[in-house]
Image (cartoon, helix red, strand yellow):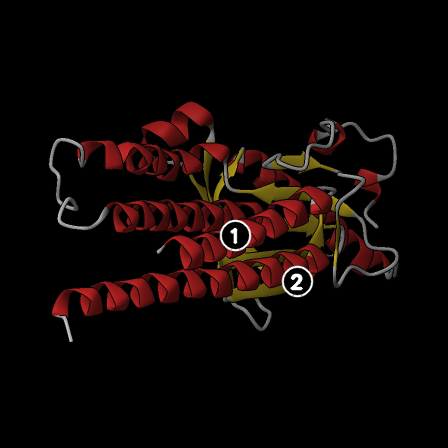
Amino acid sequence: MEFEPLIWDIAKLFFLFAYLVYIVFAVVAVRQVYLMTQTIQVGFEFVLKTIAWFHLFISIAVLLYAFVTL
Amino acid sequence: MPELYTSGNKNISQDAAPHNPLASFCLRPEKIKFETQEAQEKVILFLRQHPIVNIPWIVIVIVLFFAPRVLEFFPLLTFLPERFQQAALILWYLVLMAFALEKALAWFFNVYIITDERIIDVDFHNLIYKEVSDAKIDKIQEVKHTMGGVAGVMFNYGNIYIQTAGAQPSFDFESVPNPSGVTKILQELRTEEEIEAIEGRVR
């Protein structure tokens, strides 16, 4: 068993885990934007929700990209 | 509802500004509503921190955005294969995006609302902690405002400290624009509430 490939496998797992944690953050952000726009409506809700969903979409895309390329 | 804000009385509250969802100081906004608003309750003043308070974190984001360029001169990650260097770079920008998003949301949702009946303080500390508190106008005992620092004086913003006899003894409106104007509006509302109480009027 070679040592070097194992190191890069661990590194890959580290990055995938980090991206996964980021997706959790993005989901929390979407949820919190929905809760806060219920708490207070200022006429900017659609833009905020779009940004939050776009952010979540990016974080998922990054994880998929990392899963393929790493 | 206090007549100051419904009759033809000309005072500070009559100088309404057009509604802007990103505004920090909005008099008698028509579109703003909040969760616990009662049917007859009217929003007199909507406040959030002055936009200038965002400058420090925006500068940090800009600096950190270009920080990976520095690594070209100090190649700390060159021991990594190309694909891992790229992954590290993406992770860096993700964390930076999270920081900017959290700061922007905290500014946007950290608001103070003054209605004809009460004051509401919505504190959005971070993505997992928020706090909403309110107090009746007639429970306000003391209002104090401070303005300090070069930026505060230049851009006319400061803090307002409100002492109440309610469940939450104090409200702090931090870095809000035109603190003396806000204090004046609160005084007008308190006066009107006192008159209502003396006359025995109920909305």
Q: Which residue is mark 1?
A: A61
* Residue that lies at the very extreme toward the top in this rendered image: B154
State the residue at coordinates (13%, 70%): A3
Chain holding disc 1: A
Q: Quickly name the residue at label 2.
A: A35
**Depth order, front residue of B3/A65:** A65
What amino acid is found at the position of numbered circle 1 in the picture?
Answer: Ala
The image position of residue B190, as x and y in percent, is 68, 51
On screen, B118 above or below B94? below
Q: What whole-number distance in Å separates the C-alpha atoms at marks 2 and 1?
A: 25 Å
Q: Nearer the viewer, residue B191 or A52?
A: A52
**Quadrant holding the C terminus of chain B:** bottom right
Residue at 17% across, 46% down: B77
Left or right for B184, reference B63 = right
Instruction: Classify residue A21 by image quadrant.
Output: bottom left
Residue B3 screen position, x and y as percent: 84, 43
Marks 2 and 1: which is nearer the front?
1
